[in-house]
Structure formats: C-alpha cells, structure tokens
Image (tube, grey):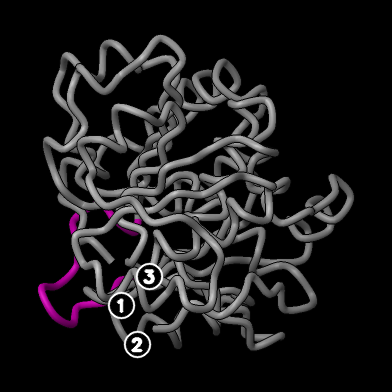
C-alpha cells in the first residue's frame, strides 16, 4: 500500500458532493452506485446493508504512524454513501475494542503495509488493493461504454493492484496488455493468467488509448501520449501527471486518493459469500 500524505486526505470530506458530480459526468454513476455495481449489489441489498451494519474506523500507530486526517476521510466517505459509522478515540487494540463495544460489525483499519475492512460476523477480510482495482475497473468500463474487445494497457501490472486489475479487466472482456519494470515478476504472473506483455513502455503508451495506471511513479505518462480519445484510470499514488497532461485528459480521467476504494471495500465486506477473482499471489 502506498502511504498517503496529509494533503491527499485532508479535504476529502468537504468535496464529496462535487466528486459525485464529476463521477456522474464521466461514468453516469455516483460513488455509491459504482461501489454497488463493482460487486454486483442491488439497490435492495445495499439498503439492507446500510440498515444492518455499523462500521468502526480505527487509527493504527504501527510503522510510520497515523496519517493525520486519514480516519476522518474514511469515515467521511462511508458516511457520504449512507453508512452508519463510529470512529474510535483510542488507537490500535484499544480502538478495535472500542468500536466493537459500540456495535461495529465491520472494521476499517490500516498500517504501512495493508488497508483492510473486516466483517466480524462473516470473517471476511477485504483488502484495499483488490477493492480499489475492482472499483476502478468498473468505473473505466462505464466511462468507456463497455470494454468488451477493447485493448487496455495496465502499467504496473506486476504489483498487487495491477495484478487484480489485469484479472478484472479480462473478466470485462478486455484484451489486456501489461507492462512493469519488474519484468520477471510480470512474466511469472503471466504463467497463470492470459494477457500480452509490453516490452517498451514508451511504444505502448503511443499505441494504446485506454490506460490503467497502477504504477506509483511520476512522469511516465506525458502530453504526447494523450490522444483525443484517451481514457485513463489511475488509482496509483502519487498520480504523477503534469499539469499539461491533466488539462488534456481531465474529463476522461478516473482518479481519487481513497473514495472508490473505500466505498467498494464496504460493498464487498457486506457480501454474504466470498467473491473469487482468481489467485494473484501475495
């Protein structure tokens, strides 16, 4: 998990209505609707989940410590989609005990390595990397008007987020191409999953118009790579796009620090049965 910065999360709770409007413009769906669609949840199932589950958000101090504003941002996103939430005053084990005592059935917590949601009743653990990939693939599919038969380039396809994206894009019927600077790891992943390898990122970016950027790096997507019909889903942090690139692709870009991942984590945590996307490794 890429560690967020304070400036990434401090204003999230204040801009969620505007964020929903931007999603509707790009995908025709709100954040809540994307989260529902990403896991195949009906309106009735979401309504039942919202009435049934209280979510506890717990700050964790291990590693580099709590990111100021992170738990407030998670709580704000969940509240925005209608979730009943409680946030612990204590941290770590004390915080976990506190939210359970307050009636939380699902708990969100993160350290430097993983960000998870745990359904205490079903014992389901939802990882942010998989949920974020699921939500972003859903949003990209909506923005593209369907990905069946479309070529999609996954940048950073060997990482946890990228591997999930490859699998989920294939499930949407996309023809997936992937690049990663860790070529041995990507080649190993390809032994069990069917996708095409890209040898040269520069050439790949010039050829592909639908991009899924799962690489936490800066500067690899440049203005000359953006076409009039380029579509970009970029869950990787930092976003790493220049102002020139942002201005040219802004209305065809799916990006946020936490929103889609958190909303999808909740939707997936509510499901009664484990959804399988295929094994991708650790």
Q: Which residue is mark 2?
A: 94
Q: Which residue is mark 1?
A: 90
Instruction: Write the residue at 39% across / 73% down.
Output: 109
Q: Which residue is mark 3?
A: 115
Which of label 2 and label 3 is nearer to you? 3
- Measured as percent of width and height from the top left, residue 107 is found at 51, 74
Instruction: Write the residue at 56% across / 49% down.
Output: 135
Residue stretch in magenta: 59-71
* Label 2 SS: helix
- Measured as percent of width and height from the top left, residue 201 is found at 23, 43
168 in the magenta segment:
no
Task: Check contact, mark 2 vs mark 1: CB within 8 A.
Answer: yes
| Res. 193 image quadrant | bottom right
* Label 3 SS: strand
Q: Which of 35/69 is in front?
A: 35
Marks 2 and 3, the one that precedes in the sequence: 2
Mark 3 surroundings: few (<14), some (14-19) or many (≥20) residues within 10 A:
some
Q: Is residue 202 above or below residue 229?
A: below
The N terminus: image quadrant: bottom left
């Amino acid at each position: 998990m890429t560690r967020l910065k304070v400036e990434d999360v401090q204003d999230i709770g204040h801009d969620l209505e505007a964020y929903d409007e931007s999603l509707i413009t790009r995908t025709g769906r709100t954040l809540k609707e994307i989260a529902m669609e990403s896991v195949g949840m009906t309106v009735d199932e979401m309504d039942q989940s919202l009435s049934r589950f209280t979510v506890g958000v717990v700050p964790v101090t291990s590693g580099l410590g709590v990111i100021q504003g992170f738990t407030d941002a998670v709580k704000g996103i969940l509240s925005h989609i209608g979730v009943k939430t409680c946030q612990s005053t204590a941290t770590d084990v004390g915080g976990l005990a506190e939210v359970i005592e307050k009636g939380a059935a699902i708990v969100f917590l993160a350290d430097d390595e993983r960000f998870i949601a745990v359904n205490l009743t079903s014992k389901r653990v939802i990882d942010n990397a998989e949920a974020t990939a699921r939500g972003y693939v859903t949003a990209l599919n909506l923005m593209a008007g369907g990905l069946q038969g479309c070529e999609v380039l996954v940048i950073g396809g060997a990482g946890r987020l990228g591997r999930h994206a490859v699998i989920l894009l294939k499930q949407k019927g996309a023809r997936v191409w992937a690049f990663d600077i860790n070529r041995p790891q990507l080649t190993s992943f390809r032994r069990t999953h069917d996708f095409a390898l890209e040898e040269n990122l520069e050439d790949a970016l010039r050829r592909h118009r639908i991009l899924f950027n799962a690489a936490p790096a800066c500067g690899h997507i440049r203005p000359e790579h953006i076409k009039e019909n380029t579509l970009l889903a970029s869950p990787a942090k930092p976003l790493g796009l220049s102002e020139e690139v942002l201005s040219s692709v802004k209305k065809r870009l799916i990006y946020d620090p936490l929103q889609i991942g958190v909303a999808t984590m909740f939707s997936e945590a509510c499901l009664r049965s484990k959804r399988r996307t295929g094994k991708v490794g650790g």
